[in-house]
Amino acid sequence: METNRESVARTENINFKSDNTKFNIIVDSVPNGLIVVDIRGEILMCNSEMEKMFGYDNGELIGQSLEILVPREVRTNHVGLRSGFFEHPSKRQMGAGRDLRGVRKDGSEIPVEIGLNPLATEQGNFVVASVVDITERKKLDLMLIKAYEEVQQKNLEMEQFVYTVSHDLKAPLVTSSSYISFLREDLQAGRYKDLMDSLERVEKANKKMHELIYDLLQLSRTSRMELRVSSINLSQLINEIKKDLRDQLAERITDLIVPENLPVVQGDPKRIAQVFENLIINGLKYAALNDHNVIEILYKETESEWQVGVKDNGPGIPAQYHKKIFALFQRLDNQKEGTGVGLTIVSRIMGLHGGHAWVESEPGQGATFWVSFPKNPTFPKENHDGIH
């Protein structure tokens, strides 16, 4: 192969540079990479943007084979494609509909978009290629896809929310209205013994509506909350929750076992307390069905995170519901207390802490609800309305 100096001389003989200074100024002002290649695949000319894009020094690409810029696994095939272009030259976009990659000097790869333009001269046929690094565009595309998926999820949740407002909130109101009518009739007829039953039903309906409104308010706050991050001793935090729930634990004949050596994690203590309180109450509602029940706090360590579980000895959850139960307003047993919002709140709070929530369970084997805490968490930089 010719030396770089000989190649440059041959390029000048081909008359690419009738006025070297003006030519370089014009070519180097182009924001895209430009490269001229002959039928043998030898690089005869390139601008500074091309050299910068692929990490080469000034003039270093001249005289090199074009295939050094192509991924190794497709180089052989690329030679045939290049020959085919010279046989049927035309202005075109290279690899339309496919992801093209270029190889930089250091071996790293970048996504590129390439336009080809044939150049016929008295000295022979050449091709001028315009090369654009689309790394930032690819990143933007991924961001747009993620944003679209998030919008779709929000739309689904909004549909569920509208259904809940129109159905779940309406039901207690209908019940209350009906029994208020019964109360009026009982009062007018002097049936005072029936008054207490109607009053209890009105009270129960109003309580259900209050719980749903409260849970919806809590859910709305999870997307707008300001995190006050500090170190959290999980053993101390969960033992405080145990004290607060002692009456409910006693009523359901349930022992809550909390290890003394749970990890210390980073997060908002108030929000993490909300997570474990929701999970423990969930166990009390759906799992505490035996003469003696146990809810146990477990933990394990991976290379990058701590995983903490809330295990119960209840009836378990079929695999097809493992993801569904974290969705908004989803409940496995509509006869149980609750609004179907608690696990959604758990999932969202853990997401804000860089972790996630999931369940491991089989029917008849109890369930363990896990949450993960990254050892090196990153938290949202922007805080919104500072709700605590």
Image (tube, rainbow, N blue to C red):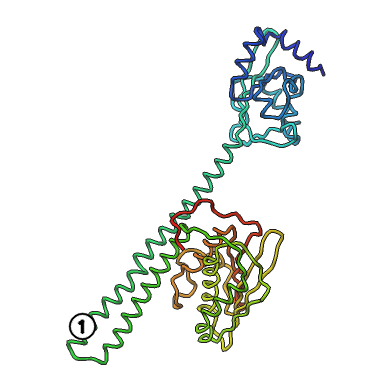
Q: Position of residue 284 (x, y in %)?
A: 53, 79
Q: Position of residue 13 (x, y in %)?
A: 72, 7
The percent position of residue 154, horizontal first and vertical second, equals: 45, 55
Write down the quadrant of residue 5 in the picture: top right
Question: Does residue 324 sit above or below 105 in this rendering?
Answer: below
Residue 225 image position (x, y, % from top left) = 47, 59
**As drawn, 159 above or below 264:** above
Whether residue 372 sits left or right of residue 7 in the image: it is left
- Find disc 1 in the rendering and name its residue: 184
Q: How many marks?
A: 1
Q: Is residue 64 above or below residue 299?
A: above
Give whichever of 151, 240 is nearer the camera: 240
Can you name the residue that lies furthest to the left here? 188
The quadrant of the image that shows the N terminus is top right
Q: Residue at x 75, y 22 (%)?
A: 60
Q: Nearer the viewer, residue 256 or 44?
A: 256
Tell me if mark 1 has few (under 14), some (14-19) or many (20+) residues whose alpha carbon lies within 10 angstroms of its own.
few
Q: Secondary structure at mark 1?
A: helix
